[in-house]
Image: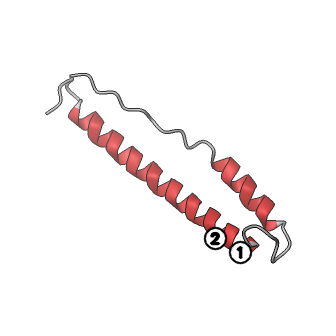
């Protein structure tokens, strides 16, 4: 049985940090999302990205152990 697993690329963490730093430079109370709301949202995004990375690694480890001998059990 052939199993294809697409690995997600989370190398964009530096982009999240760039946005966080840009938002941090906004004056407090700036229009659109308030600075504090945007900072909270980016923090949650960073945390979710880290959790997804751990889940992906765990699933890959499980798949590797299942396919260790070339067959799916």
- Pick the residue in front: 69 or 4: 4
Left or right, residue 6 beside residue 16: left
Residue ranking furthest to the front:
32
What is the number of the mark on residue 7?
none
Q: Label 1: which residue?
A: 36
Q: Is residue 17 above or below residue 26?
A: above
Left or right, residue 48 beside residue 69: right
Quadrant location of residue 60? top left
- Pick the residue in front: 53 or 40: 40
Q: Give the structural element (helix, strand or loop) at label 1.
A: helix
Asked if disc 1 and disc 2 are in contact, CB closer than 8 Å, the reply is yes
Give the Cα distance between marks 1 and 2. 6 Å
The spot of residue 50 in percent (x, y) is: 51, 55
What is the number of the mark on residue 40?
2
* Mark 2, other Cα within 10 Å: few <14 / some 14–19 / many ≥20: few
The spot of residue 26 in percent (x, y) is: 84, 67
- Residue in the image at 13% along x and 33% along y: 73
Quadrant location of residue 22? bottom right
The spot of residue 59 in percent (x, y) is: 33, 44
- Residue in the image at 17% along x and 25% along y: 71
The spot of residue 40 in percent (x, y) is: 63, 70
Left or right, residue 39 beside residue 50: right
How many circles with numbers are drawn on the protein? 2
Quadrant location of residue 66? top left
* Mark 1, other Cα within 10 Å: few <14 / some 14–19 / many ≥20: some
């Amino acid at each position: 049985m052939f199993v294809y697993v697409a690995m997600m690329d989370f190398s964009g963490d530096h982009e999240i940090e760039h946005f966080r730093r840009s938002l941090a430079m906004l004056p407090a109370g700036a229009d659109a999302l308030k600075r504090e709301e945007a900072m909270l949202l980016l923090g949650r995004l960073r945390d979710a990205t880290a959790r997804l990375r751990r889940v992906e690694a765990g699933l890959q480890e499980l798949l590797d152990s299942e396919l260790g001998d070339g067959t799916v059990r």
